[in-house]
């Protein structure tokens, strides 16, 4: 379970998160929507400990992410993260990309790491690209590679930060399919997304973030069918 | 080591061997300086990259001195003043020390550039997989940044090899010094210097070919 209490985050004088409270249960799929610049990415970075926080707390399975005593490298193994930019390691093949962290972080043997990497690449539909370098893969394939790379650490939670925003439109589908599959398998997911169809169909809950606050959070039916806040209504009418 | 020169005489086959030995010493002193200088320079580059303000204010000016004072002056000063602080180094060791520092001061900038070439998103992706700071540095930044600045590094390395000729002022008989000795004896500067040039070329050509081949392999 992820528990966020009174989270505040500043970049210098700029307050980006202004008191976020949020619980994400195991097995839940939560989508986060909201205008660009509202603090969605920053929220994910804070959850993963990639950005320090100034106030409040974030606990992952009871462990405080930002406590000094926390072994953050260890805790991060529980949280896979997929970014807008896929960040494939260009000097490694697809298989090596995925096998690297299991090998050096988890200390797996080379053979073990390769097995798990092959399995995860198979899973996202890249079973025929094991020896391909990222430069030979499309954006959609590289993003699925990034998903496989995160999954190879066998995380409990997956965080997606606009995983399809940088893709050409015709490549969005394959990545969303991989995410759907993951959701069906029961993965706990937090997805920052602009794909409203995905948010509606796949999520258990949808959170609407506005200027560093969770303005409204509810089931997709309520959020898209009967939005309460005016800001959310305006946001939804703008994207339709 | 220096042959006794009692009279002028023409170029002989044994002189070629003499030059080859000198070329070997050029290679030796260069390889030592480049190896030590690159290691040191990588550490300095990392300090410049990470330390930001503090390193920029302290380390950078020091490196600037070594980058801008002509090598020949550094060599002579070091060779003559090192004994005062109790360092009795022979010409070879003095040359290695100064060439290494000089090489390090150049590699520092190259290394910093390499680290900057690896974007923050890439490093966040690595850290998000649970890699520690050092694992990220070793397995992501080093290979990616290293490849990005490899051509610049090869340039520095070849430059250091040529600059090693300056250690001849300390009496270390490397390629240039050996040529001068032969020129004095044979009075055939064109021939000797052409041969010496060919030796320098023979030392650096394989390196730049090998580097080009590596780059080619990485780019596919
Ligand atoms: N590293 C940073 N330094 C300074 N400001 C930042 C930084 N990262 C994000 N911001 C600012 O924080 C705000 C929220 O950014 P972000 O979390 O990326 O929003 P979103 O993902 O919702 O588009 C924006 O105003 C952005 O300019
Ligand atoms: Mg964002």
Image: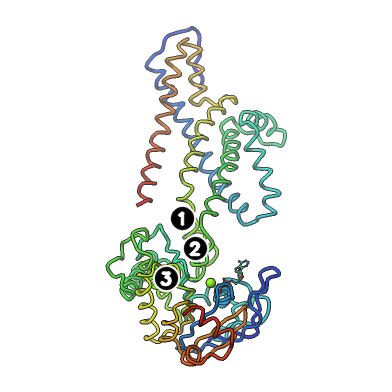
Which residue position is annotated with label 1?
B144
- Under tag 1, what secondary structure? helix
Q: How many marks?
A: 3
CB-based contact (under 8 Å), mark 2 and mark 3: no
Q: Nearer the viewer, residue A42 or A147?
A: A42
* Residue A200 picture location, percent across and down: 43, 86
Which residue position is annotated with label 2?
B122
Lateral position of residue B66 relative to residue A217, left or right: right
Which residue position is annotated with label 3?
A102
What residue is shown at x 49% (from left), y 11% (from top)? B185
Lateral position of residue B151 relative to residue A170, left or right: right
Q: Quadrant of residue B103?
A: top right
Q: Which mark is residue A138?
A: none
CB-based contact (under 8 Å), mark 3 and mark 1: no
Query: What is the C-alpha distance between the residues marked 2 and 3?
Result: 18 Å
Q: Chain of mark 3?
A: A
Q: Earlier in the sequence, mark 1 or mark 2?
A: 2
- Under tag 2, what secondary structure? helix
Q: Are marks 3 and 1 on the same chain?
A: no
CB-based contact (under 8 Å), mark 1 and mark 2: yes
* Residue A145 picture location, percent across and down: 38, 69
Query: What is the C-alpha distance between the residues marked 3 and 1?
Result: 20 Å
């Amino acid at each position: 379970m992820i528990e966020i209490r009174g989270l505040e985050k500043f970049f210098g004088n700029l307050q980006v998160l202004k008191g976020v409270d949020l619980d994400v249960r195991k097995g839940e799929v939560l989508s986060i929507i909201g205008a660009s610049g509202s603090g969605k990415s920053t929220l994910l970075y804070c959850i993963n400990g990639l950005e320090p926080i100034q106030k409040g707390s974030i606990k992952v399975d009871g462990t405080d992410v930002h406590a000094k005593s926390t072994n953050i490298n260890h805790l991060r193994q529980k949280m896979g993260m997929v970014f807008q930019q896929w960040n494939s390691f260009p000097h490694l093949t697809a298989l090596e990309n995925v096998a690297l962290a299991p090998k050096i972080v988890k200390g797996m043997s080379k053979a073990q790491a390769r097995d798990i990497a092959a399995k995860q690449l198979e899973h996202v539909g890249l079973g025929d690209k094991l020896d391909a370098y990222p430069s030979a893969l499309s954006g959609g394939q590289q993003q699925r590679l990034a998903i496989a790379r995160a999954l190879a650490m066998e995380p409990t939670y997956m965080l997606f930060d606009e995983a399809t925003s940088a893709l050409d439109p015709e490549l969005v589908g394959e990545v969303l399919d991989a995410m759907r599959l993951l959701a069906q398998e029961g993965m706990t997911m937090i997805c920052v997304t602009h794909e409203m169809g995905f948010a509606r169909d796949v999520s258990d809950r949808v959170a609407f973030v506005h200027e560093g606050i969770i303005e409204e959070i509810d089931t997709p039916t309520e959020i898209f069918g009967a939005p309460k806040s005016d800001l959310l209504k305006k946001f939804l009418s703008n994207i339709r | 080591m220096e042959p006794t020169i009692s009279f002028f005489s023409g170029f002989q086959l044994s002189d070629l061997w003499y030059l080859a030995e000198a070329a070997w010493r050029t290679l030796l002193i260069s390889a030592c300086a480049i190896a030590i200088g690159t290691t040191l320079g990588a550490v300095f580059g990392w300090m410049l990259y990470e330390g930001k303000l503090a390193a920029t204010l302290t380390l950078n000016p020091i490196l600037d001195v070594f980058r801008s004072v002509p090598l020949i002056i550094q060599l002579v000063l070091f060779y003559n003043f090192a004994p005062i602080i109790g360092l009795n180094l022979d010409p070879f060791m003095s040359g290695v020390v100064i060439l290494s520092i000089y090489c390090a001061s150049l590699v520092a900038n190259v290394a910093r550039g390499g680290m900057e070439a690896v974007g923050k998103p890439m490093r966040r992706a690595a850290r998000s997989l649970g890699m520690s700071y050092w694992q990220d540095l070793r397995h992501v930044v080093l290979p990616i940044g290293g490849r990005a600045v490899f051509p610049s590094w090869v340039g520095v390395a070849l430059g250091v090899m040529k600059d090693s000729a300056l250690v001849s002022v300390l009496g270390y008989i490397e390629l240039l010094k050996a040529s001068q000795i032969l020129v004095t004896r044979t009075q055939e500067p064109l021939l000797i210097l052409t041969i010496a040039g060919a030796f320098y070329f023979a030392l650096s050509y394989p390196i730049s070919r090998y580097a080009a081949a590596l780059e080619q392999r990485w780019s596919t």
